[in-house]
Image (cartoon, coloured by chain):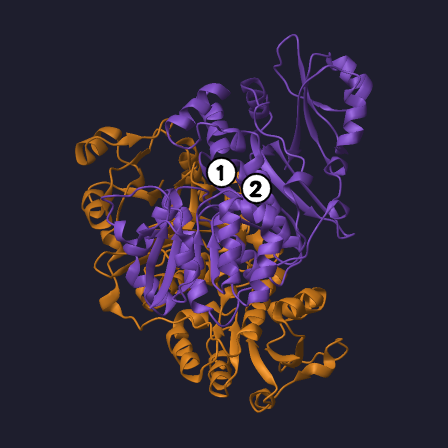
Chain colours: A purple, B orange
Amino acid sequence: MFDIAILGFGTVGSGVMEVIEKNSDMISQNAAQEVRVKYIVDVRDFTGSPYEDLIIRDFAIVENDPDVKVVIETIGGVGVALEFSLRSLRAGKSVVTSNKELVATHGYELTRLAREKGVNYLFEASVGGGIPIIRPITQCLAANKIKEIYGILNGTTNYILTEMVKNGATFDQALGQAQANGYAEANPDADIKGHDVCRKICILSALCFGHHVYPNLVPTEGIESVTLTDIAYAGSIGYKIKLLGRAISREDGKIAAYVAPHLVREENLISGVEGVMNGIVVRGNAIGDVMFYGAGAGKLPTASAVVADIIDAAKHVSARKWLSWEDGGPEMIYDADLLENAWYVRTSATPEQVKGIFGDVSFAGGCKAEETVFTTAVINKKQADVLLSKIPVLSLFRMVD
Amino acid sequence: MFDIAILGFGTVGSGVMEVIEKNSDMISQNAAQEVRVKYIVDVRDFTGSPYEDLIIRDFAIVENDPDVKVVIETIGGVGVALEFSLRSLRAGKSVVTSNKELVATHGYELTRLAREKGVNYLFEASVGGGIPIIRPITQCLAANKIKEIYGILNGTTNYILTEMVKNGATFDQALGQAQANGYAEANPDADIKGHDVCRKICILSALCFGHHVYPNLVPTEGIESVTLTDIAYAGSIGYKIKLLGRAISREDGKIAAYVAPHLVREENLISGVEGVMNGIVVRGNAIGDVMFYGAGAGKLPTASAVVADIIDAAKHVSARKWLSWEDGGPEMIYDADLLENAWYVRTSATPEQVKGIFGDVSFAGGCKAEETVFTTAVINKKQADVLLSKIPVLSLFRMVD
């Protein structure tokens, strides 16, 4: 018998309960013992719930119960979630979480504390929902030096962009639909402004490159600047617009990380990741590019990743599955504005003016009379900015092949 | 210091040496000790090779050296590879292999022996080359009941089909190019007749569903029947032709597995897996569909999967990573001819004749005068055969969305 406690009985917490009940035979077999939820900690009232008897309000009961080996933190945020995670680890309990904000901002201290206490701090569900990504990076790709990781890390914004491309919905219409379908929060800022992607690329950077990358050091742009006009032009030259989180390891040990909408070439499988799905590409020096694809959010997918971590914690009570990295800071960061790529530009300047400034560029055909769309040579943002300062820029996006 | 021996110094074996040297710092860190190749066993002459001093001909030296903890079998086939694997396990050494034929035919006895001897038998590289798939199935998806697994499991045939689609090459031309590029063997039968895919779907079935599925029980069709004509018609209705291995777990515990070319709808990401790449979809009851994509073959990608297994073996000398399953036989197999799907049919019958027999079907437009192309309702193979016996069938393929 392996006792666990769930902190927070919202979407993910109740999904964990559901997956444990639904697949109990298989989970017991894989964990080599029965996994039992002994407590659910939540301050809300769940009178009439089938789990009413398990629900308690006082976290100290969990903290002081030596039977509880693993604490599942699905509270979210960095307030009480951080406090309870620290107290659980200090009490010698492993912690499993789906809380990307907490891992992105406090992952260094939490993994270090877990290591000190000889327990596990696991967070497969914090990136890519149910998609296996954390464990493949740390185990399967252990023989590779990872050079780059990028992908579609937020289902809400990808749903909005997909609706715009496929059904010609405006940004506001698509956002409204996402909210109506439960894919977007009433306050959608964390998604549409790119903060959620930023947290996830920080976690992936730390795992892949060995240093914590703090979210406030990552330039982050959301999808509010994406228009139907640009989507149509992008399509006409064989690209889709996708919000990407991206991190690159430099030869000098520095890390370049940023979040921004990109034009992605249609031959790139990432451009085929539609709706609420996520897709993540990892580039290793032996394996080349591998991609992981699946539901990036949702109750059962996310819960299934949490439960896989619980099984791992149950199997490794003595053998630790340490995921950890060094601390980071501004001195570890390479300016993303120095990364080179081709750029998509929409301007009210004429093709002749563009040619005079940029030289030999590719123009998109069929433009409206009053605007010009072109793609630049491979240059960095600072170089682009110098040239672009000479024309009125309506839209500007990075391009990836 | 963790000593290993490599059996067979061909493409994969020498790739393992290369990856270990290239990424030695990272591998030592991940394995928590230095990994050293103590012997390379090969009967060929490697005079002048930088590894000349490591090369021996007598496997018994490895077998009797207690320093050697892990044996890397990259010989291939089921002759001496089986003998040396069994002797290594009996000598208490873990075995890591990339040999799909051996795992597909003798995996049950080899994993059972490993378990008895308290060592590991690991084979991440046997399916999907460098793509992490074995470990994600056994660990990350441990909270899921897996219902189905399918995908593009052979790079050679996918390269040939891609060349036919993209460049209008005939099957023979594309095969010649594949041979010229080193993607296909001089005798390409194992690839183009589907046997390689068959072995891989057998391994995946065993892992996902818990019973060995022997290759001779899996109906296997290659790509020789795929014509440029069918590729063009498929494209006109929004599909690509791909060789898929597929296995389904039935509610009654039986397993349906087969290998055949399919029409795959262009919206399905699998249809975007081109050239020598592989893509594998796993369908779990909590996670939904996840896909794993990457180089399915090649020296360094395959070697990187082997080295990940070596690292795992080094970290788990005492804690075992048992991958194992029950034996299987004909009584576990569900007849793939009873699986239902829509079918693509090309016939010399007229649309009127087809309507008279099949009722309301979808016809492809723009057919040549002397032929008719249509897609059926969702029916099984036996039902289809009854109807198809009444018309001259030029081509017949399963369809997946």
The picture places residue B326, in percent across and down from the top left corner, at: 32, 72
Image quarter (top left, top right, bottom left or bottom right) of the C terminus of chain B? top left
Task: Using the image, determine if residue B114 lies above or below residue A43.
Answer: below
> Could you say which quadrant of the image residue B362 lies in?
top left
Name the disc covering residue A273, or none: 1
The picture places residue A329, in percent across and down from the top left corner, at: 72, 47
In this view, the residue in front, A317 or B360, is A317
In the picture of the structure, the residue carrying the numbered disc 2 is A151
**Residue drawn at 33 percent across, 32 percent down:** B370
Question: Amino acid under label 1?
Answer: Val
- Of labels 1 and 2, earlier in sequence is 2
SS at badge 2: strand
As drawn, which residue projects farthest toward the top? A369
Question: Amino acid under label 2?
Answer: Gly
Residue A277 shows in this picture: yes
Image quarter (top left, top right, bottom left or bottom right) of the N terminus of chain B? bottom right
Q: Are marks 1 and 2 in contact (CB under 8 Å)?
A: yes
Local crowd size for mark 2, using a 10 Å CA cut-off: few (<14), some (14–19), many (≥20)? many
The picture places residue A270, in percent across and down from the top left corner, at: 54, 40
Q: Of the residues tagged 1 and 2, which is closer to the observer?
A: 2
The picture places residue B302, in percent across and down from the top left corner, at: 57, 63
**Residue drawn at 66 percent across, 56 percent down:** A210
